[in-house]
Every structure is written in C-alpha cells, then in structure tokens.
Image (cartoon, grey):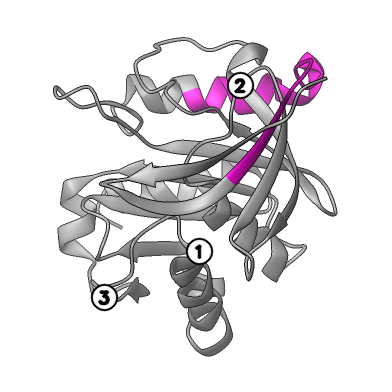
Amino acid sequence: MTTSSEGVMDEGVIKYVCQWTPGAPVAASQLAELIAWRDRLWQAKQIGLYPNGIGYGNISLRLSAHSFAVSGTQTGHLAQTTDHHYTLVHDWDIDRNTLHCIGPIKASSESLTHAALYDYSDAIQAIIHVHNRDLWQRYQGVLPTTAVTVPYGTPAMAYAMQQLLQHGDLNQKRMLIMAGHEEGVLVFGSTLNSAAQVLYQHMDGD
C-alpha cells in the first residue's frame, strides 16, 4: 500500500501537508446520511462548482473520537456521490500542519479546519461548509466571524475558530462566518440534521 504526501495548495499557498493512503471506502452504512445531505446541499447550490471550474463546499461526520469521514477533493461538480467520493481522516496535527487520510480519494483541501472543530469538542459530530454570498455578507460581524486576514483551511483558521469557541458564543450559534474566505460559511452540530437546520434557519431569515 502506497502513501502519498502532498502539500495542499490554494492560490499558490500550501495550506497543509496531506498524507493520503489509497484504500477501501468507509462502510456504506456509515456514509448513508453524509451522502444524502451532501447531495441535498448540492441541489440547493450550497456545495458545487463555480463556472471557472473551482469546487466549493464540503461536509464531514465524526466516526470515532479521533476520526471522521469527509467529502473528497474535486467532487464539487458531482450532483450525486457514492462511497468512493469520501475518505477517512484518522490523524492530524494542527501545529505541524499535517493531516493523514485513507480511502479511495484524497480529503477535501479544507479538512484541517474540520479537524480543529472535532478536536475542540466531543459534542461536535458533524460539520457542513457551504458557500452562500447572502449569508456571508449579511452576518459578518453579527455571527462569530474570523478576521479577513485568516485564510480558510490553514492552522491560522483552526486557531481562530478555537479562540471563538473559547471566548465567544460560537458554541450557541453553531455558525461561523469566514471573512477571509469569500462566501464561506460553516455550521456544525451533534448530527448532520442539526447542523443543516442551523444553515436553513438562517437562509430563511431567522
């Protein structure tokens, strides 16, 4: 079994080093709800592909105390996904800027941010990252918001989120606006359904 190690790039900047071991997909029974929500969010255009070919949005679900399943990189164009479009993240080190995954596809380039939230609290079991310009503009500074200088998917974002969790009301709001990541909005919860409901409530104007 071969493991590849590669720096995840975004606009020429290495976000983190992803060490990927190709392997079998996570059991379909563990992914069913994740797949259903991801494809529903794609239909709602909260996850997808921009006209320039760049994908946006990702989704994950905790599987154990220190592992989670996450949508794979370069899957934003897919209307429907299967178990081969998700991978298992089983180890990470925010300080060292590294993440390890195993499965049929490399983890989303933004997986380190998911890992930081899972690190922070066992109560966080599911995370959804979408792109929604209306919410992103409307709630900057209203809901917990990271600084415009903090790029998403980096250790800096991980630390910024943890600081908001410690000192703000992010735990109660369960929705984060990323000022430095255009259109980027993140929600989380104890289940995928509860995380999604936070998103839909705000989309409805509540």
- In the rendered structure, which disc, 2 or 1, sits on the residue that comes first in sequence? 2
Q: Earlier in the sequence, mark 1 or mark 3?
A: 3
Label 2 – label 1 distance at C-alpha: 28 Å
Q: Can I make out residue 200 in this image?
A: no
Q: Is residue 180 magenta?
A: no
Residue 21 falls within the magenta-colored stretch: yes
Residue 142 quadrant: bottom left
The picture places residue 47, in percent across and down from the top left corner, at 36, 30
Quadrant (top left, top right, bottom left, bottom right) of the C terminus: bottom left
Residue on which the image places disc 1: 174
Gap in angstroms between the C-alphas marked 1 and 3: 13 Å
Disc tally is: 3
Query: Position of 162 compared to 33: left or right?
Result: left
- Comparing 167 with 15, the one in front is 15
Q: Where does the magenta region start and end?
A: 18-38
Q: In this view, does 79 lie above or below 88?
A: above
Crowding near pointer 1: few (<14 within 10 Å), some, many (20+)? many
On residue 105, the disc is 2
Residue 162 image-quadrant placement: bottom right
Mark 2 nearby-residue class (10 Å; few <14, some 14–19, many ≥20): many
Give the residue number, with chain letter if any, for mark 3: 142
